Image (cartoon, coloured by chain):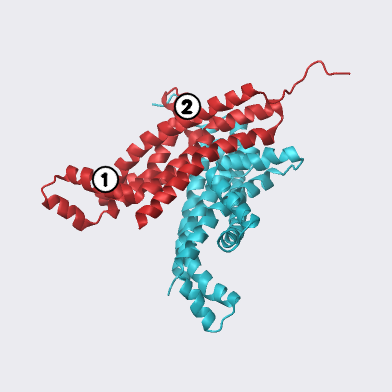
Amino acid sequence: MEPTISFFSGFTPNDLLFLGEAALRTLWISVLSITIGTALGVLFGWVLYEGKLAATLTVAPVLDIFRSVPLIIQLVLFYNFAPIVGLNLDPFASGVVILTIYTASLVANVARGGIEAVETPMRRAARSLGMTYWQDLRYVVFPIGGRAVFPAWVGVALGVMKDSALVSVLGYVELLKASQILITRTQEPFLILTIAGAFYFALSYPISRYAASLERKWAQ
Amino acid sequence: MFDYNFHWRPVMKSLPDLLDAAFLTLQVAVLAMVLGIIIGLCLALIRMHMKGPIRWLASCWVELARNTPALFQLFFFGFGLGAFGLHLSPYMIVLAGLTFNCAGYLAENFRGGFNAVPDTQLRASRSLGMTAWQAYTRIVIPQVFRIVYHPITNQMVWAVLMSSLGMLVGFRELSGETQFFASRTFRIFEYFAVTAVIYYVIVKLILIASRLLATRLFRY
C-alpha cells in the first residue's frame, strides 16, 4: 500500500533559494558586526596603546573576558540578560551586539599591534615635520601599521564570519540553521551540509589565500 | 533597577555537577589537542615532503578545517556521517570535530615552525654523523617546538572554548550540562552566568600553567 501522507519530501530547487537567502543573512550579520566591531576595536586598540596603566586596569580585563568565554555562552547570556534590564531585542539584534563586541575585543589587540609596529623615530619624524598628533595618526601610523596587521585582521574577520553560525542558537535563521531545518524535512543531511559547507568555504578560502599572498608580497 | 528576581540557589545546588561537567570539557579538549598535535604534525610533514594524492588529501583536510565553521564540522560528524549509517555518540562527535579542527590549525603552525628552522641545521647535524631520525628528534623538533609552543597554548584555549559547541549536538559537557539544568529550572541567566565564570577560570588556569611550564622548559 502506498502511504497517503509523506512526512519527508526531497530536496527541491526551491530549497536552494531558501539556503541562498539564509546565506545572505549570514553575510549581512557578519558584515554588520565586522564593520562596527572593527571601528570599535581600533578605538580600543588606540586606548590600550595610549592609556598605559589606566587602560591596562580597565579596558584590557573587560576585553579579555570576551575572548575567554565561549561565544555561544556569551550569546545565550546576553539574549537572556537583555530582558532583565528592560531591553527587548530580537535574535538578530542580540547577535549583532555580541558579535560586534567579540570582534572589537579581538581587533583591539590587532590594532594595538599595528600601532606598535610603527617605530618611534618614524613618528617623531612626522611630528618634527610639523604634523599634529592626529595628522601623525592618520597619515603615518594608519597606513604603515594598517599594512603590518592587515593579514591578521583578515583572519579575525573570517573567524567572526564563521562564528556567526553560532547565532543560530538564538533562533536566527542563518545558513547553518537553514540547513538544519532542511535536513529535518528532507532527511538528506550529507547533501545539504555539503552545500552549506561549500558556501562558507567559497567565501573564506579565496579571501584567506589573498591575505596570505599579500602578506608574502609585503614581507619582501 | 531589575524587574527580575535572581535565584542563585538552584545553581549553587547543581554546582558539583557543573564542575564534573567542566572536567569532562577539559578531558575532551585535552584529548582532542593530543590527537590534534599528532595528526597536525603528520599533516604538516606530508604537505612539506610528499607529492600526489596523499599530499592533496592533507591539503584538503587543512583547508577545510580552517575555512569552515567549527559548528559545521561538528554537524558534519554528527548528522552528515549518519547518511552513511555511521552514528557516533555525542562524545565521539565532539572529539572527532575538535580533533579535525585542531589538527588543521596546528598543521599550519607546524609548517611555519619547520620553515623557521634553517635547512643548514639539519645538514649540519647529518654531517656530524647523526641519522635522519636523530637529527629530527634532537635538533629540528626541539627548535620547532619552541616556536610553536605559544600557538599550541592558544589552540588549547580555543579547544576548550570550541568544546562548548557540544551543547548543540547533545553532549553534556559544561555547556550541555548547563543547558540541561537551565531548561529544567528556567534559571537560564543564572546558570549561564556561572558557566561563563567557570570557562573564564579554566582558560586563565591553562594560560598560567602554560606560562609556568614555559619558564621550566625554555630555561636555556
Q: Is residue B180 visible?
A: no
Relative image position of residue A73 (x, y in whole percent): 51, 38
From the viewer's perspective, tell me whether residue B209 is left or right of residue A43: right
Q: Residue at x 83, y 18 (%)?
A: A3
Q: Residues within 10 Å of mark 1 (few under 14, many from 20)?
A: some
Query: Chain A's colour?
Result: red
**Mark 1 = which residue?**
A142
A123 left or right, relative to A32: left
Residue A5 vertical position relative to residue A130 in the rendered view, above or below:
above
The N terminus of chain A lies in quadrant: top right
**Tally of numbered tags:** 2
Cα gap from disc 1 to disc 2, whole angstroms: 32 Å
Visual hue assigned to chain B: cyan
Q: Residue at x 26, y 53 (%)?
A: A118
> Viewer-nearest of labels 1 and 2?
1
Quadrant in which the C terminus of chain A appears: bottom left
Q: Which residue is mark 2?
A: A92
Residue B184: give x, y in percent of width and height: 62, 31
In this view, the residue in front, A216 or A184, is: A216
Identity of the residue drawn at 53% across and 30% down: A23
* Disc 1 residue type (three-letter): Phe
- For marks 1 and 2 on the same chain, the one whose residue lies earlier in the sequence: 2
Q: As displayed, is residue A52 above or below residue A175?
A: below
Q: Residue B190 placed where, x, y %?
A: 51, 35
Look at the numbered disc 2 and give the secondary structure of its residue: helix
Q: Nearer the viewer, residue A95 or A178?
A: A178
Res. B207 in view = yes
Q: Are marks 1 and 2 in contact (CB under 8 Å)?
A: no
- Residue furthest to the top: A4
Quarter of the figure with residue B13: top right
